[in-house]
Amino acid sequence: MATNVAISQKRPLLHALDPSTALGEILFGLIMTLTFTLGAGIMIEEEGREGARQLLIAIIGCNIAWGIIDGALYLVGELFNRGRLRRLGRSIRDARDEQDATRLVAHELDEIVGEITTPTDRVGLYERIAKHVRSKPATKNQVTKDDIRGALASFVLVFLASVPAAIPFIVLDDARLALRISNAILLALMFFAGFWWGRLTLSKPWIVGTTFLVIGVLLVVAAIALGG
């Protein structure tokens, strides 16, 4: 057990999030950055290099702010999920008998394990879970090291999503060219995020990548139209 804990603690920070959550954070960062850059044409035209500098500061600052917000929301979400399970545990311990306790477990888990178990297997599993929960005292709901690692990973992913878009403004003097290259980089990253999604599922990576690209552009256009 000690060995397993040690291995878990040595995992890279970004592995603190499951693939779905990590992908969501990356997409959020990309969409936020793309919203800024696609809506910045007027600033670049009017202010040139100075406008590009201001845009660069805005991109990085915005994603830092939203990275912090996302990290905080991750912590809140983890505490909420554990709090809900604590409430369920209390209901199971307070159940009148084993049958009622088992019914509560079934209500929680049927949707999850229903397709991979037989009815007989589920009954035995739910009875064992109910018995185990009723034999254990309630635990405290507090922030853990894994929660903090997950929050930090959320912040890092949202922030890193803005870095590729900022590079053209650092290395190029032509602000308009830098803006076009920045947008192209972000659109390419949107595609590769979808491609990654497809690789992790049974979907076709190229189709998912293209879909993510189109949806991302539509979301950004909607955000700009609404004043975002």
Image (spheres, grey):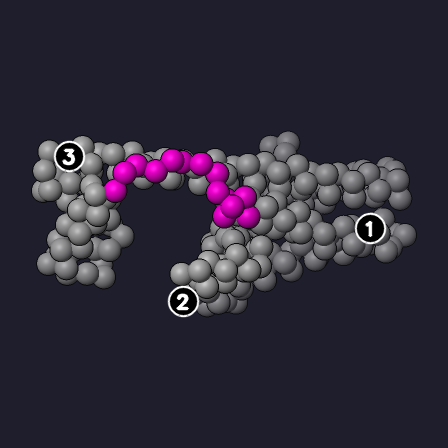
Name the residue carrying label 3: 95
Q: Amino acid type of disc 2? A: Leu
Residue 19: give x, y in percent of width and height: 48, 57
Magenta span contains residue 114 = no
Element on which disc 3 rests:
loop
The stretch of residues the image draws in magenta is: 136-149
The count of marks equals 3
Which quarter of the figure has residue 46? top right
- Please tell me which of labels 2 and 3 falls first in the chain: 3
Circle 1 crowding by C-alpha within 10 Å: few under 14, some 14–19, many from 20: many
Residue 83: give x, y in percent of width and height: 36, 35
Q: CA distance from mark 2 to mark 3?
A: 41 Å
Q: Amino acid type of disc 1? A: Phe
Q: Amino acid type of disc 3? A: Ala
- Horizontal arrangement in the rendering, residue 94 relative to residue 17 (left or right): left
Figure check: 64 above or below 205: above
Circle 2 crowding by C-alpha within 10 Å: few under 14, some 14–19, many from 20: few
Res. 198 visible in picture: no
Query: Which quadrant does the N terminus fall into?
Result: bottom left
- Horizontal arrangement in the rendering, residue 20 relative to residue 60 (left or right): left
Element on which disc 2 rests:
loop
Identified at 9% across, 42% down, the residue is: 99
Residue 221: give x, y in percent of width and height: 61, 42
Residues under numbered marks 3 and 1 in contact, where contact means CB atoms less than 8 Å apart: no
- Please tell me which of labels 3 and 1 falls first in the chain: 3
Q: CA distance from mark 2 to mark 1?
A: 38 Å
Circle 3 crowding by C-alpha within 10 Å: few under 14, some 14–19, many from 20: some
Name the residue carrying label 1: 169
Number of the front mark, 2 or 3: 3
Q: Residue 202 has which mark?
A: 2
